[in-house]
Image (cartoon, helix red, strand yellow):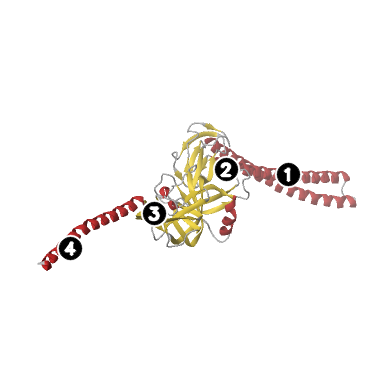
Amino acid sequence: MKAQSAIRFGVGTSRFLTVLVLPVLVMLSGCAKETVQAEQRMAAPVMVATVLTKNMPVQITSIGNVQAYATVSVKSLVNGQLDQVHFVEGQEVEKDALLFTIDPRPFQADLQRAEANLARDTAQLKQAEANVARDDANARNAEVDKRRYQVLVEKGVTARQQYDQVNANAEALAAAVRADQAAVDNAREAIAGDRAGIENARLNLQYCYIRSPIEGRTGSLLIHRGNIIKSNDTALVVINQVHPICVDFSVPQRDLPAIRQFASTGKIRVAASIPNDPGLPVEGTLSFINNAVNEATGTILLKGIFENRERRLWPGQFVDVTVTLTTQRNAVVVPSQAVQTGQSGQFVFTLKPDKTVELRPVTVSRILGEEAVIEKGVEPGETVVTDGQIRLVPGALVQVKSTL
């Protein structure tokens, strides 16, 4: 009976202990969950990214102003009435395309007058040359008679008076030849002047037809048909050459040595981005480095030249300019939003294996868009915080929400 009661007592005790232990385990489990939940509540939510190595361009950025490759103010070289306009405002015109016609009738009359003068003086030249031929023949005959009478006078056969008459006639004919030759020379000079007048009249007649000196786009028409215009006075229209086109921009003088170095080894690429234009940047090359630094601003003027075949760049437009000098191989790169600025300089938060963060000072070489090139401070493969830094201090526990 005692043994049985003992056994019964033991079973009851076991059940009692089991009933006692279960609540304790439940309580411990609940405490553990509360501890984890508390730790999770204490952890700051962050987004992170991995430090990478990649090839990154070495670039200089600036604001540029688009300039026409060439600008021409078209003026008239003759006086007259504007008779015709052969283009519309804003039209693309080719080189030597006809733009204006000035009333050519006065200049055609001038040309005809000059040609008539040439014909008259040519006839006079022929008459003078004929007179020279006639008088020269008579003068030669008179000279023969003179020599003959001189012999006769010396022999006493002919009177001295006859010889004097023959001699005077020979001298008169010689003078006539000289006069005729002078008339020939005068006629030739007149003909030369007439020919110059004809060339001038033809040139003025050509100036009546004003042609484009360059390929480009016309601006506003400044003088309209029917107006009287003066030689080399008011511009009739302004033409801008936009294919190719230039972009002027300035960079700090500290960038000049690198620009000159890479310019000496080859062409430097320049890209122009148009604000509010979804298209790709327009590509060109560096074409000009000014010969002096602006003392007032400490910058130097550069120019890029662009083919601009699609006419996306327009004179007077402001654009974002990017000069690509070279490409840096295996650069250490982090998202630019990971870089923070404090009292001691720039830094990033790096993620440690125990889910805490470490404040790491960094040296940023440059920022290109959404990426920052790091000279020192982090190594490839490390993890940096890209969002949520405002809640962090060194050693803070974090909870990763997303990884870039």
Furthest-bottom residue in this view: 3
Q: Quadrant of the N terminus?
A: bottom left
Q: Quadrant of residue 5?
A: bottom left
Amino acid tagged 1? Ala
Amino acid tagged 2? Leu
Which is closer to the viewer, label 1 or label 3? 3
User: Residues under labels 2 and 4: Cα distance?
Assistant: 130 Å
The residue that label 1 is drawn on is 182
229 over 376 or under it: above or below: above
Which is closer to the viewer, label 3 or label 2? 3
Secondary structure under badge 4?
A: helix
Q: Earlier in the sequence, mark 1 or mark 3?
A: 1
Q: Residue at x 74, y 48 (%)?
A: 136
Q: Residue at x 57, y 56 (%)?
A: 258
User: Residues under labels 3 and 2: Cα distance?
Assistant: 89 Å
The residue that label 4 is drawn on is 14
Which is closer to the viewer, label 2 or label 4? 4
Question: Quick check: can you spot residue 123?
Answer: no
Q: Earlier in the sequence, mark 4 or mark 1?
A: 4
Amino acid tagged 4? Ser
Q: Quadrant of the C terminus?
A: bottom left
Q: Position of residue 267 (x, y in %)?
A: 53, 58
